Image (cartoon, rainbow, N blue to C red):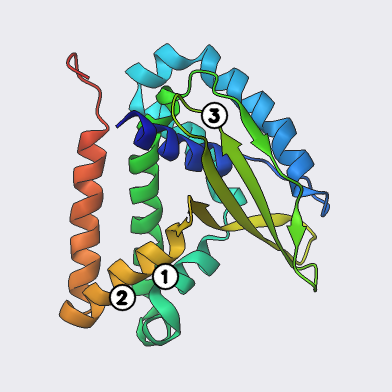
Amino acid sequence: MKKLSIQLLAVAIAVLFTYSATAADPKVRMEQVTAKMSSEILANKDRIKADSDYAKSLIQDHLLPEVDTEYMTKRILGKTYWTEATEVQRKTFTNEFIGLLLNSYAKGLASYSGQKISYSDTAYSKSGKTANVRSSIETDDSPILIDYRLKVQADDSWLITDVIIEGVSMAKSYASQYRDQIKAIGIEATLQKLAEENARAAEATKITDET
């Protein structure tokens, strides 16, 4: 359970990076912002534990601008379902999916207690348009290896397109889940189930005296 919490935290920290306006080395920027965010999280642990809305706001304010949400949701749905979906359905899926991520990872922030995070050198594709940065998070057991896939944008900034935890792609996992669901019950029913799942996740993040 503790390792799972650290994994969730890793994803949250990964998307809390604020990349510079130019296509600087993602590894260098990640190291700089990790130090900043680690300090912020450690300084506000009590508030994060007591106020789930505050925890979500940390992710909301820094996450959404740094993730290529349209690219990710389009990849999750796949070309066929994305094309078949209406504009309203696409927006609904994107918004509900983002909400689910916020609810899922909010509590992970409070699990961070100063574990060392180190990064390998950035690996670029031949075209230089995509990159991978691998991090290692120390735990009481074996280190957690996480790969961050990024894509350069028209303004030379980098946006996260996938997070791979110990070889498991977040985008591919969600793609398998939701494509199978759409195939079985259709996109409208899938959107309804996602909304219900998101509501349950939101309820689970509420802080109580027993939390």
Q: Are marks 2 and 1 in contact (CB under 8 Å)?
A: yes
- Residue at the disc numbered 3: 138
**Mark 2 residue crowding within 10 angstroms, few (<14) / some (14–19) / many (20+):** some
- The answer to which image quadrant residue 157 occupies is bottom right
Q: Amino acid at mark 2?
A: Arg
Question: How far apart are the alpha carbons under marks 3 and 1?
Answer: 30 Å
- Residue at the disc numbered 2: 179
Place of residue 51 in the rendered image (x, y in percent of width and height, measured from the top left): 35, 21
- Relative to 203, 84 lies left or right: right
Q: Secondary structure at mark 3?
A: loop
Place of residue 81 in the rendered image (x, y in percent of width and height, measured from the top left): 36, 83
Q: Residue furthest front?
A: 142
Assign the N terminus to one quadrant of the image. Answer: top left
On residue 96, the disc is none
Q: Are marks 3 and 1 in contact (CB under 8 Å)?
A: no
- Residue at the disc numbered 1: 76
Residue drawn at the location 75% of the way across and 52% of the way down: 122
